[in-house]
Amino acid sequence: MTPLLACVPVCMKFVAIGIIGAIVVVFGLSNPVPIDDSPKEEGPSRYGATGPPP
């Protein structure tokens, strides 16, 4: 009986990690980040400045 009781904290820790991992995966898949929302590259400035002042 003692080895079984010694396993309980370790086993419960792995079960808790698995449950938390499953929750993270479910929320991650239910709220995907759309690829189209990435910021667009802007062209050169309308003032013609291409960098910091000299």
Image (spheres, helix red, strand yellow):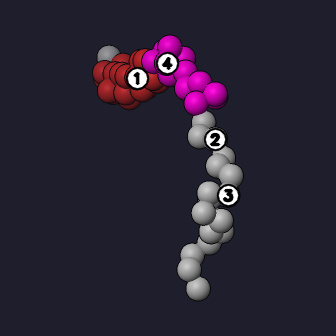
CB under 8 Å between discs 1 and 2: no
| Residue 51 spot, x, y in % from top left | 62, 72
Question: In this rendering, is residue 45 above or below 14?
Answer: below
Of tags 3 and 2, the one toward the viewer is 3
Q: Nearer the viewer, residue 14 or 52?
A: 52
Read off the residue under disc 2: 40
Q: CA gap, disc 1 to disc 4?
A: 17 Å
Q: What is the quadrant of residue 3 in the picture?
A: top left
Of tags 2 and 4, the one toward the viewer is 2
Q: Earlier in the sequence, mark 2 or mark 4?
A: 4
**What secondary structure prevails in the magenta region?**
helix
Of tags 4 and 3, the one toward the viewer is 3
Read off the residue under disc 3: 44
Of tags 1 and 3, the one toward the viewer is 3
Read off the residue under disc 4: 31
Q: Earlier in the sequence, mark 1 or mark 3?
A: 1
CB under 8 Å between discs 2 and 4: no
